Image: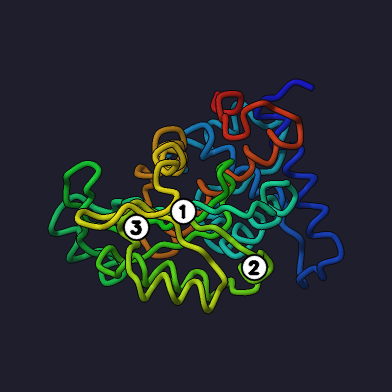
Amino acid sequence: METNLDTLVIALYVKIDDDAAGTPRLPGRPPKLSHSELLCLAVMQAMLGYHSEARWLRHVDRHLRHLFPSMPGQSGYNKRLRAALPQIKRVIRVLATNTDFFDDGVWLTDSTPVACGKSRPTALRSQVAGWAGYGYCASHSRFYWGLRLYLVCTPAGMPILWALANPKIGEREVLEAMLEVDADLVAARDGLLLITDKGFAGEKFEERLRSEHGVTLLRPSRKKEIQRAGEPMLKKVRQLIESINDTLKGQLDLEQHGGRTTDGIAVRVAQRVLALAAAIWHNFQTGQPVSRSLTAYDH
């Protein structure tokens, strides 16, 4: 089977349609562009690197009419995409559960900056002021104004949990809240091992994870701290989450999301997480040797 963007989108369309089967339809005239087609369009936009919705819709009109015969205007596409955020989150989970990666007993987690503005006037006038804030990225030695994306995924890169938070909120606080929201998912995995970096260090935090969620946290030791058990293996494993963040930023243009409102930023980040999950899911279903490769889909 040839693996390309068309085959991915067709398989994704069928999967979303099957998942929605049996769901009561809302009253009124059904839209010409179905819900499944809308999410497939969102994945293709992220894969092909179109930051502008106007340019993307012009590209679809010229080159992709064989897949999407009925297209809304830019305003309609934007409104429907923002309204589809809950469905995007659901489809990410559906795709994850349809792979063997979902049952993995090892999770990786990290946070990465998502800049939302470059100037002081933007920070003052923006609709996301208060949600977004100033933070510091140690990896690139720079300050930024925006949010942090927290991603919990399997070693294969499949997203399990994710959240956006103000950079001033502590990493441990955000991660603990994420695990509490999906406590049933965590409880279904006995002996779950969670690999993090030094930013999640804290004796009380680690003890709460162990006692309340049954999660063992594995992280590098801090300066002046005795070397922790399992630390020699962490260097290679830690590179996995760094490379997953690099896929989101380098191939899926996470930092060029273009969102200006709370809903706009949230859905554009979710759009890229969905694209990553869709690629991993399709690579798994077609037996590709590298589960997180997007090379076949980005052109």
Residue 283: numbered disc: none
Q: Position of residue 294 (x, y in %)?
A: 56, 30
Horizontal arrangement in the rendering, residue 238 relative to residue 88 (left or right): left
What's the CA distance linking mark 3 and mark 1?
18 Å
Which residue appears farthest toward the right when viewing the image?
22
Question: Which amino acid type is shown beneath numbered disc 2?
Answer: Leu
Question: SS for tag 2?
Answer: helix
Cα separation between marks 3 and 2: 23 Å
Marks 2 and 1, how far apart in space? 17 Å
Instruction: Please provide percent x and percent y for residue 92.
Output: 63, 54
Is residue 52 something one can see in this rendering?
no
Type of residue at label 3? Arg
Q: Which residue position is annotated with label 2?
A: 185
User: Which residue shows up at 29% across the image and 70% down it?
Assistant: 169
Question: Of marks 3 and 2, which one's residue comes earlier in the chain?
Answer: 3
Q: Which mark is residue 195?
A: 1
Of helix, strand and loop, which one carries label 3?
strand
Q: Nearer the viewer, residue 295 or 159?
A: 159
The local crowd at label 1, few if under 14, some if 14 to 19, many if 20 or more residues have their Cα within 10 Å, is many
Q: Report crowding for label 3: few under 14, some 14 to 19, many 20 or more residues within 10 A (C-alpha).
A: many
Q: Earlier in the sequence, mark 2 or mark 1?
A: 2
**In the image, what residue type sits under mark 1?**
Ile
Q: Is residue 259 above or below residue 4?
A: below
Q: Which residue is mark 3?
A: 148
Residue farthest along the top direction in this orientation? 2
Under circle 1, the secondary element is strand
Q: Nearer the viewer, mark 3 or mark 1?
A: 1
In front here: 5 or 178? Answer: 178
Would residue 196 appear left or right of 135 to someone viewing this image?
right
Give the label, 3 or 2, closer to the camera.
2
